[in-house]
Image (cartoon, helix red, strand yellow):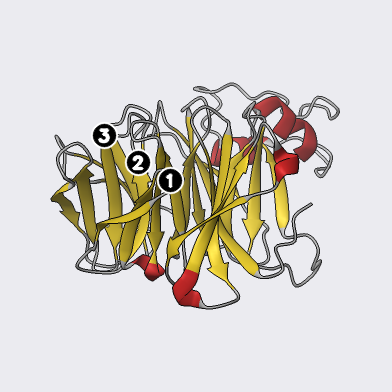
Amino acid sequence: LVDLSDYLIYTLDVSPDDNWLVAGGATMGDATKNYILLWDLRNMSAGPKKIAGFTQNIEDVVFSAKDKGVYVRDNAGRSIKFTDLTNVKEVLKPAEKINSITMNRDGSRLAGVGESGSLYLWDTGASFAEKILYKNKTALTTITFAYDGKRIIVGDANGLVMILSESAPTPRILSGHTAHIEQIRFNNAGTFLATVSRDKTIRLWNWADLNKQPIVLSGHTDWVWSAAFTPDDEQLLVGMHSNSEHSKETIHAWPTKITTMAGLLCQYVSANLSLDEWETYVGPVNDIPQEKTCPNFPLNNK
């Protein structure tokens, strides 16, 4: 165990080779002398290494497969630095507050979204040459690359989720959320996209068929702030801002395998869908024949 009573952790990342864990946040001491923490996952008993050279809040840490180090968004979004895990240097001083950064899988592109609604691309192999790919009407709040490295998914302060690329800068809209998007996460297989919002819901999108309605995970009593898929993609772990009803229950675990999810849901219902409900929520029975969704109840053909 490590005493972190003098440090608030805001962000984590694991290296592509699974050997290192890095954490960033805020020191309880002099905020102009902030630092990140680095653990060797092969030798956790050694404790974390402190890497100094940062200032104010650290809100993103992103490992780079290409550059063998970590990009750090510090100074509350006013600076982006790089550390080779020993030395630290500022590589970008943006013209505006950057709310989130991400990196494509091969480390060639760093991307960020700003308070003015700008989506930035920086070429790490060309002295961080900058390109503004898109300009939104309101603040962009979070960003991630798709697994193909070509498409970028962003969220904004009003709840819009948008998919863009350099070849198609006109966004495709994924609608449904009604408040600030906190995070966007792919599962490990790259088949599902989770969008996390202050509207107290998570939406799970089928990446192969975005025309399908997303699965909506609701019932949270406060803002949903973060999400992470388990390595086997069987569960989605969700972090909440608070839980006024059960103060110790601020992390929820949702099954993401349909059969597992159905098995859990069937514990809370008293009957299968009626004919009217089937046609309302599933589709016309002539197109999609009615069936039992919970095997422990009879077919409800009333």
Q: Residues within 10 Å of mark 1 (few under 14, many from 20)?
A: many
Element assignment for label 2: strand
- From the top left corner, tell me how far across and down residue 16 is, in percent: 48, 30
Q: Earlier in the sequence, mark 2 or mark 1?
A: 1
Q: Which residue is mark 2?
A: 103
Q: Quadrant of the C terminus?
A: top right
Q: Amino acid at mark 1?
A: Val
> Which element carries disc 3, helix, strand or loop?
loop
Image x and y of residue 156, in percent: 35, 60
Circle 1 SS class: strand
| Spot occupied by residue 227 in the image (x, y as percentages of width and height) | 58, 48
Q: Residue at x 67, y 31 (%)?
A: 42
Q: Is residue 90 left or right of residue 226?
A: left
The quadrant where residue 109 appears: top left
Q: Are marks 2 and 1 in contact (CB under 8 Å)?
A: yes
Q: Nearer the viewer, residue 187 or 32?
A: 32
Q: Which badge, 3 or 2, comes first in the chain's sequence?
A: 2
| Label 3 packing within 10 angstroms: few (<14), some (14-19), many (20+) | some
Q: Residue at x 18, y 53 (%)?
A: 134
Report the residue marked by disc 1: 62
Residue placed under numbered mark 3 in the picture: 108
In the foreground, 196 or 106:
106
Distance of label 1 from label 3 (alpha carbons) = 13 Å
**Three-letter amino acid code at the position of disc 3:** Ser
